[in-house]
Amino acid sequence: MFSMKPFLLTPFILLAHFCGIAQTNSPIKGRIVNGFTKEPIAFSSVRWLIQKTGNISDSVGKFSIANSNFPNDTLIIDYVGYDQKRIGKKDLHIEHLVINLENLRSNEQVLVKSKFNKGLRWWKSVVTNKNLNNPYHIPSYGCEIYKKIELDLNNVNKNSFNNIKFLKPFAFVLDNIDSITDEKPFLPILMTEALSNYYYTSNPNDSREVIKAQKAYGIRNESIMQILNGFEQKINIYDNYIKLFSKEFISPISDFADKFYNFKGADTQYIKGIKVFHLLFSPLREGENTFKGDAWIEASNWAIRKMNLNISATADVNFVNRLSIVQEFEKQDNGKLIFSKDKLTADLSPLPNDKLTFVIRKSNSYQNFNLQEQDIKLEIAKNKKKNEVILLENNNNNASFWDTNRHDQLNNNEQNILKTIDTLKKLPLFKEYSRNIEFIVDGHRKIGKIEIGPWYKWISGNKYENTRFRFDIGTNELFSKNLRLSGYLAYGTADQKFKEKLSIQYRFKKQKGLSTEFSYLNDLDNGRVRFNEEDITIDNIFSQILRRPGIPQKFLGQKEYKFLLTKEWESGLSNSLTFTRETFEPFTPLPNKRNFMNGKSSEIISSDIMYRIRYAPGEKKIITNRRPIRFKGSKPIYELRFSKGINGVFQSAYDFTKVHAAISQKIRVPNFGLISYNVYAGKIYGDSLPFMLLELHPGNEVYVYNRNGFNLMNRFEYYSDTYAGFQVEHNFEKKLINLIPLLRKTKIRQFWTLKGVWGVMNPTNRAFNRIELGPYQLRSLKNHTYLEYGTGFDNIFRFFRIDFVWRVAPPYPANYTPSRMQPIQNFGVFGSLKVQF
């Protein structure tokens, strides 16, 4: 019997078949990005392995390719300088792919077939036209800058959260990762954004930045905020050297880059109708501060439109696993290419084996350019100091403001970061972890409006006190941002005496930069040389571990009343007026105080007033609750001090005048390391002054290297009332180490040091202090110079430094017999720890 069912079903079968074909052949769409920086990769090759069809991504990394008819086909993504990516067709189930490409390993060279090296010819043309294309050579410009910084705890995965006890409560962050990427989960810590008006002139070289708004999400820390907003590190690829982490990296378009880079010309493309050349570059040798990356060069004028930089894996920088810089330029109305976007991405690893890493993403976007020279000069004329940064008080922090004024809206991943940070801030456990980490690193624990610590001073020891206990307490910013009360109480088990200090500090609200302090101290000098808070003291848990043998400890008892008034200006100029009353008591083996009474009183009491002026142009500082943290610039720092001892005031028995001057600076020598120097001189006018009122040249009695002292000179060994000295250190970094092939891949750095001081003492002070007499034998330099020279290796295992030091001391008198109290060591090996990039 004939049936109509097959005919009735045929249209539906055919429709289903064609729908299936259409579904199978629907195009594959997506975006290709750098797996580390998340920057789009333009003009990548996308092709099928079996079907042999393909396409390329556009200028923003987007692509579309017809689907393959072969079910087992593989999609291949290629781009010079990156590892090839292969994805099976069965895994292409997402409508809009985000494909991450990873950079080739640093020791692999990019192969580009060519009869001659057109890349080297392109590079030469770029260098020839550098002065015409360098944006910093534009006479003046103004613009609006949007800055965004993100800090994340990286390298955490599902197992990390489940297996590491302190991470387990935060496993919910796994829910906030964008599911269409193959990123590992991370724990967001901080995100900041800021909007500024920026003005720049090239002649004279000056700038002004007015921060109109800023907002922070996450762990709110005032010090971090000031670092992020006050220390803008500008990167200019047109410079011969690019400064990163206080290190110099050779730019791929420096005047001499051909001595450090391999250049390859890849291909020619058209971006928005403009012909551009694609230049590839890679390090010529390992162990040098160079980059690997690529650049897009405008063919008509040899200007850089975009450059990608990735530091070499063997570059001389610590804790940085990967670092990438992307800089883009856009043409303005005057025909010049000027900054459009900057992005810096760094993967930092403080722990070995990369068990815990931090990723910093910093981006700048530039818009609304103003090239009217007169407008810019009027704005910069408002500066009170060079390169001034102003933070407006009426900041806009509401969400609607940022939604309207951001140059680029937050993507899904960044929005998830804000949600995660907001959740973390509300977790009591997260707050507790933050406090514990701060306590270990900073040494202080905040409890409400007070803080205790530092913990490393709670217990220590010395020969005079035996075991020493100390407890510090002070107010924090919750008590007051302008007034701070602090102090400590210490006790020695051998002398069975209490020691104490009390301090009151106040910063005036209406008078910016004006502060005052009153303090009372009754304690041992604890290794301080100049009796101020800048000296390193030995009352800590680590002090007695590495003492040089055979040298007895020496202490001065000190009772001090001090009043200090300080005024600082934004130009870097500061001055202070200090009144001090001190009572000294030397302890054995130092000479007994009876030798210095001179019938005047039963105590050694001195009252003096000191005026100090300091000029530190370019120095940046962070105002914290306890004290300012200073970051020195590249310019010299000048200091001048005048002190006047006043006889008869508050029982003072001494009349003297002191003058001291010093200049210090850090100078980076292009391609040959860093030189630090300090030159100083002084004169003390006064007769019959006890040794503690003279210039005590700083010695060191432990095997920990002291940068500011003489490491083979004993404490209380040499005195002067007229003196001049210097300190020089030249760190070659890896410049010499790289000459040894086996050491190029190491992080070891080399340096040399030279220190010296000349001094003399007038006959009256020599006689009064019984120089070179008695069991201890205080000494004068007698118009001679004491020298120490040395060399060594730095950055051993990223933290350790070893110094080899030799001593050249003034000759001894013919009738002089060295005291057993002052054993002499003419050569020594010293170690130290330093956290540095």
Image (cartoon, rainbow, N blue to C red):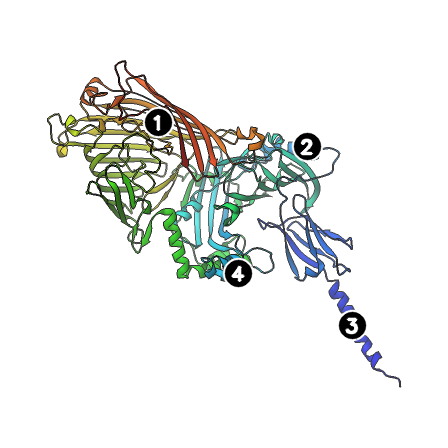
Q: Which residue is mark 3?
A: 15
* Residue 103 versus residue 727 in the image, above or below: below
Question: Which one is earlier in the sequence, the residue at label 2 or at label 1?
Answer: 2
Question: Which one is earlier in the sequence, the residue at label 3 or at label 2?
Answer: 3
Q: Which residue is mark 1?
A: 712
Is residue 350 shown left or right of residue 28?
Answer: left
Picture residue at 65% right of the left edge, 31% below the top: 124
Q: Amino acid at mark 3?
A: Leu
Could you tell me if residue 362 is visible in this image? no
Q: Secondary structure at mark 2?
A: helix
* Residue 476 versus residue 543 in the image, above or below: below
Q: Amino acid at mark 2?
A: Arg
Q: Quadrant of residue 691?
A: top left
Q: Amino acid at mark 1?
A: Leu
Crowding at label 3, few (<14), some or many (≥20) Cα neighbours within 10 Å?
A: few
Expressed as whole percent of the image width and height from the top left, the position of residue 115 reads 75, 34
Q: Secondary structure at mark 1?
A: loop
Question: Which one is earlier in the sequence, the residue at label 3 or at label 4?
Answer: 3
| Tag 2 and tag 1, C-beta contact below 8 Å | no
CA separation, marks 3 and 2?
A: 59 Å
| Tag 2 and tag 4, C-beta contact below 8 Å | no
CA separation, marks 1 and 4?
A: 56 Å
CA separation, marks 2 and 1?
A: 56 Å
Q: Secondary structure at mark 4?
A: helix
* Badge number at residue 121: 2
Picture residue at 55% right of the left edge, 30% below the top: 738
Q: Which residue is more in the foreground, 601 or 664?
A: 601
Q: Secondary structure at mark 3?
A: helix
Q: Nearer the viewer, mark 1 or mark 4?
A: 1
Q: Nearer the viewer, mark 3 or mark 4?
A: 4
